[in-house]
Image: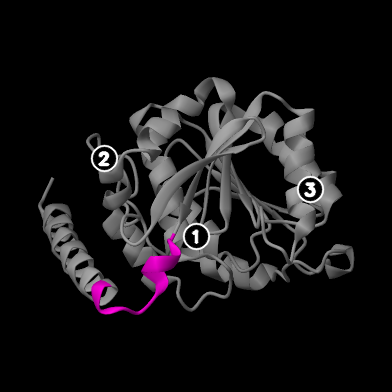
Amino acid sequence: MLQIKYTEEQGFMHPVDVKKFVKQSSSVQGWFSSEAAMLFAWVDQIQQSNQISGDCFEIGCHHGKSAMLLGGLVDPATEKLAVCDLFGMQTDNVSRSGNGDLDTFERNMKEAKDAGLTINVFQKNSADLTADEIGRNYRFFHIDGGHNPEEALVDLHLAAECLVDRGVIALDDPFRMEWPGVTEALLRFLDENNEFQAIMVGFNKLLLTRKAWSGLYLKEFEDLSCRETYKLGYPWRVKQLPFHQFDLRIIYVPDYLQKLTPGNIARRIYHKTRRFLATRRQDQAAAKPA
């Protein structure tokens, strides 16, 4: 488990550390891409830079692959991580989404706990969670639980109730054809709670925040240099399209860049070399004594 050292100059997870996390967690079973890890770390950087404090929560942690990253985003001196999963209670897993194991999860999180991270584990159906039980101090709330409409909708409403003012909800599988219930839940949530809007989708994660604070995040998301810092530049593009009355930023790879042509091969070599040199500079900067 990667441990992050917080300093006055940098209280967030550096992209170099995210790469180390991806490598170290590669053997952990789960569905969490390196790009999604970078996106979560980028949100964390925006929050830290804007003095947005609070805890992190995850519904549906399986074996802890994404929880390990969230543990790295949390400052153990002032924040905590909380998770909810059915684990062995699979008779309640009506949508058959995931199959968590508590012993495996605890093994994967042991180093983080030994290093001082507070982890509150709720082994139960997330539909039975209440805001009074888990608290209302979460700046980042990741939902990857039940994928039926009612399951995902309950989780979204709980997240909204427990989120700090400028916090972010991350929803898994928002538009996957295999899980239409999540899409239905998202649309119903936005109809029932007009305080929130969807601001960005990519790497199978959709981010929501309160409308009043969407501009804070969108300013960063629209900055190419910020995306490139978190390795989300080439070949990805960002476009915006209307979704539920607001413009949604979409991270995607254009069709023409997915084809194996001489031009695209040259572009890949160029950008790969560019990223390698940038990473080397970041590694050297991170290795310098404080």
Q: Quadrant of residue 6?
A: top left
Tell me the distance, in whole angstroms, between the alpha carbons under discs 3 and 2: 39 Å
Mark 2 surroundings: few (<14), some (14-19) or many (≥20) residues within 10 A: few
Amino acid at the residue labelled 2: Gln
Q: Are marks 1 and 2 in contact (CB under 8 Å)?
A: no
Q: Is residue 117 above or below residue 48?
A: below
In this picture, which residue range is highlighted in magenta? 253-263
Label 3: state its secondary structure.
helix
Comparing 258 with 148, the one in front is 258
Q: In which quarter of the image is the C terminus?
A: top left
Mark 1 surroundings: few (<14), some (14-19) or many (≥20) residues within 10 A: many
Q: Which of marks 3 and 1 is nearer the N terminus?
A: 1
Amino acid at the residue labelled 3: Glu
Q: In this view, does 259 lie above or below 152?
A: below
Mark 1 = which residue? Answer: 68
Q: Which of marks 1 and 2 is nearer the N terminus?
A: 2
Mark 2 = which residue? Answer: 10
